[in-house]
Structure formats: C-alpha cells, structure tokens
Amino acid sequence: MLRSVAAAVVAATTVIVCSTAMGSQPLPPVVNTVMHGSQEVRGPYAFYDFCRRTPRQCRPDEQPGDRVKLDAKRWAELTEVNDIVNKTIVPMNDMQHYGVEDYWEIGVRYGDCDKYALTKQLFLRERGWPMSALLMTVVRDENGDGHAILTVRTSRGDMVLDNRQARIVAWTQTPYEYIKRQSTLDPAVWLSLTPELPLDGAVAALPTHR
C-alpha cells in the first residue's frame, strides 16, 4: 500500500509556511524529556476542513496504543517513509496551489509542510503504526511563523519528521517552539503542549493518555 500511495503522490487560526529536505541515519539515543499535552485547544482551522473532507484520517484507533518500541526494523520504516515523502512532494505554498492561505491535503504532488506531515502519517499507519503515536504538531519556527511537523511517540522519546531537513531528530534537537498537537486518544482533538516533562528512566513508564 505504501508504494501505491507513493505512486499517487508522484502522479498527482494558524497559517503555516514551509520549506524542504531529504536523508537517513542510525538508531537514535533515548531522549531525556518528552512532550506533554495539557489543556484542549482549537486546532488549525484548515485541519477541520481536512477532517470534513477525509473523515477516515481523523478517526482514533479502536484501542489507542502505547509508544512504539523503536527497534532497528521500526527505525528503518520511519526513515524510509520520511525519505520517500521528502523526496516526492515538490514544495509549493497553498496560495500558489489552491489560492488560499492554508489548505490541508494528503497524497498530492505539490504542497507545503502539512502535506508532508499528513502523508507521512498515512504511510506509517498503512505499515501498522498506531495513530496514537503519529501526531500532527504545530510549532513556531525561528522566524515566528507557524509550521507543521509529524511527531512520533517512541520508546526512545518524541521524534520529529520534518520536511525542512533530511534527518529525523528528537524534539529537543529542533529550534522550534512547540504550540499544540493531536491527542493520542482522538486525532480530532488538539492539546496545548507543556515544553518538558521528566523522563524518569523510561519513556514507557509515563502516562500515555495524551
């Protein structure tokens, strides 16, 4: 299914601005802190339109999963999906493509950051990764602009899949300010982010309901 969706990609109140990149890497070390969702907030306005058009992409897992155990096999899947999407989608902002400031879509040939992140989320779900570990996340970049990434909840910490760089990095290794992301219980729900939560020895020991 991954390759069929990839073929389709080749064929075919936050305003988000984006750019792009590509790559692969060795298994990462464990991160000492993880992101923590706190109170419920409104998501990006374009997200709700996306859910109306593609409701299947906004449904929760039947049984929300824990953090994904990040072994060599899973890491290879993660880096492969990140590379495929970063190399396939051609960067183009929504005003150029759709004539509006922000429009979320999946499986497109041209697009900005949310298209990359949503497509990575879909590809990983098709490989059996739980939706509860694949969270669309809104950040503020170095210039103060809104930007969308995919954060992946793993046994080694929260990892960032970003169209702006090839490498998958821990969330602590980016220059971003983390604003909000989807809830692990329900992808239609967004939570504001508390910057840091102590790891206390094992990521898996932390609460997994957010």
Image: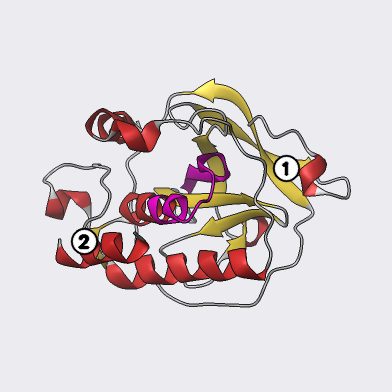
Residues in magenta, as a range: 122-140
Image position of 29 (left or right of 38): right
Query: Residue shown at 67%/46% (left/top)?
Result: 67
Q: What is the distance, in whole Å, between disc 1 and disc 2 at their CAs?
A: 38 Å
Q: Nearer the viewer, residue 194 or 169?
A: 169
Q: Quadrant of the C terminus?
A: top right
Residue 51 placement, left or right of 76:
left
Residue 106 percent coordinates (x, y): 28, 49
Q: Quick check: is 52 in the magenta stretch?
A: no
Q: Nearer the viewer, residue 16 or 4?
A: 4
Q: Is residue 134 magenta?
A: yes
Badge 1: residue crowd in 10 Å (few <14, some 14–19, many ≥20): few
Q: Nearer the viewer, residue 84 or 92?
A: 84
Q: Which mark is residue 172?
A: none
Q: Secondary structure at mark 1?
A: strand
Q: Does label 1 or label 2 sit earlier along the sequence?
A: 2
Residue at the (22%, 56%) spot, across then down: 108
Q: Which three-letter amino acid code belongs to the residue tagged 2?
A: Ala
Is residue 94 visible from the viewing direction of this image? Answer: yes
Q: Which residue is mark 2?
A: 8
**41 to the left or right of 96:** right
| Residue at 22% over, 33% down | 53
Q: In what quadrant of the picture does the N terminus appear?
A: bottom left
Q: Is residue 44 above or below residue 115?
A: above
| Residue 112 percent location from the top left of the image | 29, 56
Q: Residue furthest right?
A: 201
Q: Secondary structure at mark 2?
A: helix
> Considering depth in this image, is 106 or 1 the residue closer to the camera?
1
Q: Amino acid at mark 1?
A: Glu
Q: State the image coordinates of residue 129 (x, y, percent, origin top left).
A: 53, 50
Mark 1 = which residue?
196
Of badges 1 and 2, the one in the foreground is 2
